[in-house]
Image (cartoon, grey):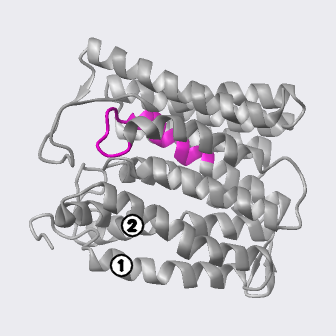
């Protein structure tokens, strides 16, 4: 099978599966009921992220069968992301205590790193840093934080889907513009089309929600793809980190400010910058589209400069993130929810 047809078929299958899951959720009353922490106002079917999971994982097997995916990447990516999706699926239906979710998340991260390797030596301000065994620990924390922040950021219609689509589009573009030559660019495009099929149903106003199974899965896959890229070309890792800046900055600034105020970071809330922005503007679509535009117009060009070797990777991250930090603070990320903009 031609890989182009695989990508087209994956997108169509994801779209169809999402529709079937929506019908099942409605028939079984599997609805997300609004509460005082919600950003939606009407009961909405949930669990649509399962379409992304199934489409992507089956497509990985097909890609491997076509000889376009190395076995260690297949085993590491498939096993880790499937475990995260399974835990999220169970948590969507029956609550799992946070400590056990965290154990499962670190187990998944460890599995991925065992097959793909940790972080290779990375260029930082002109010097090559070899992290050695410390790289495994830092990479595991990075993966677990990324999958959890993706859960945190999946709070308004379409935002998690738009983030995945634009980051994956940027990631594939970075491969095309880099000296690297291989099939690695297929993986971000595969995730892109799987998410696009779901996004058709999730774009404001959402007809179905992703659920933890989908959001955590996407976060883990994006993290693994970024670490895989580091072994292809170290500058690519910095490029991926830059592309993920919108979600990373909002979630991290929110977490830090809540912890500083003595609030429990694991308690549900709606004090992310994007949530404040959606309430102020009284719209989900404008905020969601803005995140996508930031990724493509601001973050992607900086990532390209880094990958092409025109800007140091660490410096590129600082340049990319600083305005986002200021923007997050402007929109009260992590502020007391009683203090609206």
Expressed as whole percent of the image width and height from the top left, the position of residue 102 reads 46, 42
Q: Quick check: is 92 in the magenta stretch?
A: no
Residue farthest left in this picture: 338
Q: Which residue is mark 2?
A: 250
Where disc 1 sits, the SS reads helix
Residue at 56% of width from left, 57% of height from top?
166
* Quarter in which the C terminus is drawn: bottom left
**Against 280, is 14 above or below?**
above
**Against 341, is 323 above or below?**
below
Work out how far the residue at label 2 is from the one at label 1, CA to CA, in angstroms. Answer: 9 Å
Residue 172 lies left or right of residue 233; in this view the side is: left
- Local packing at callout 1 (Cα closer than 10 Å; few below 14, some 14-19, many 20+) is some
Return the mark for residue 327. 1
- Local packing at callout 2 (Cα closer than 10 Å; few below 14, some 14-19, many 20+) is many
Q: Of callouts 2 and 1, which one flags the residue occurring earlier in the amino acid sequence?
A: 2
* Segment tinted magenta in the rendering: 203-221
Residue 115 lies left or right of residue 288; in this view the side is: right
Residue 2 position by quadrant:
top right
* Residue 303 in sight in this render: yes
Residue 64 position by quadrant:
top right
Q: How many marks?
A: 2
Residue at 48% of width from left, 27% of height from top?
50
Residue at 64% of width from left, 76% of height from top?
301
* Residue 100 in sight in this render: no
Q: Quick check: is 205 in the magenta stretch?
A: yes
Return the mark for residue 98. none
Expressed as whole percent of the image width and height from the top left, the position of residue 324 reads 43, 77
Expressed as whole percent of the image width and height from the top left, the position of residue 276 reads 22, 65
């Amino acid at each position: 099978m031609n890989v182009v047809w695989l990508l087209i078929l994956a997108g169509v299958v994801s779209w169809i599966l999402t529709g079937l899951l929506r019908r099942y959720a409605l028939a079984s009353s599997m609805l997300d009921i609004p509460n005082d922490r919600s950003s939606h106002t009407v009961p909405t079917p949930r669990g649509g992220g399962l379409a992304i999971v199934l489409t992507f994982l089956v497509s990985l097997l097909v890609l491997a069968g076509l000889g376009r995916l190395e076995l260690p990447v297949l085993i590491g990516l498939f096993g880790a992301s499937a475990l995260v999706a399974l835990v999220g699926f169970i948590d969507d239906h029956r609550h799992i205590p946070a400590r056990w979710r965290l154990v499962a998340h670190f187990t998944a991260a460890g599995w991925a790193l065992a097959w793909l390797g940790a972080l290779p030596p990375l260029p930082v301000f002109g010097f090559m840093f070899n992290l050695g065994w410390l790289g495994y620990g830092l990479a595991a924390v990075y993966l677990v934080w990324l999958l959890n922040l993706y859960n945190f950021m999946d709070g308004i219609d379409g935002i998690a889907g738009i983030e995945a689509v634009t980051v994956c589009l940027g990631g594939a573009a970075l491969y095309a513009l880099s000296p690297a030559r291989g099939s690695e660019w297929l993986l971000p495009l595969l995730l892109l089309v799987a998410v696009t099929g779901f996004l058709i149903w999730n774009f404001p106003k959402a007809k179905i929600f992703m659920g933890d199974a989908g959001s955590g899965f996407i976060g883990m896959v994006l993290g693994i793809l970024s670490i895989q890229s580091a072994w292809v070309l170290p500058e690519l890792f910095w490029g991926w980190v830059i592309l993920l800046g919108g979600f990373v900055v909002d979630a991290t600034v929110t977490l830090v400010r809540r912890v500083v105020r003595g609030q429990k970071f694991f308690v549900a809330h709606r004090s992310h910058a994007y949530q404040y922005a959606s309430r102020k503007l009284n719209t989900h679509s404008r905020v969601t589209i803005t995140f996508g535009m930031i990724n493509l117009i601001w973050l992607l060009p900086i990532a390209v400069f880094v990958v092409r070797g025109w800007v140091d990777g660490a410096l590129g991250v600082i340049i990319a993130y600083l305005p986002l930090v200021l923007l997050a603070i402007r929109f009260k990320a992590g502020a007391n929810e009683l203090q609206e903009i």
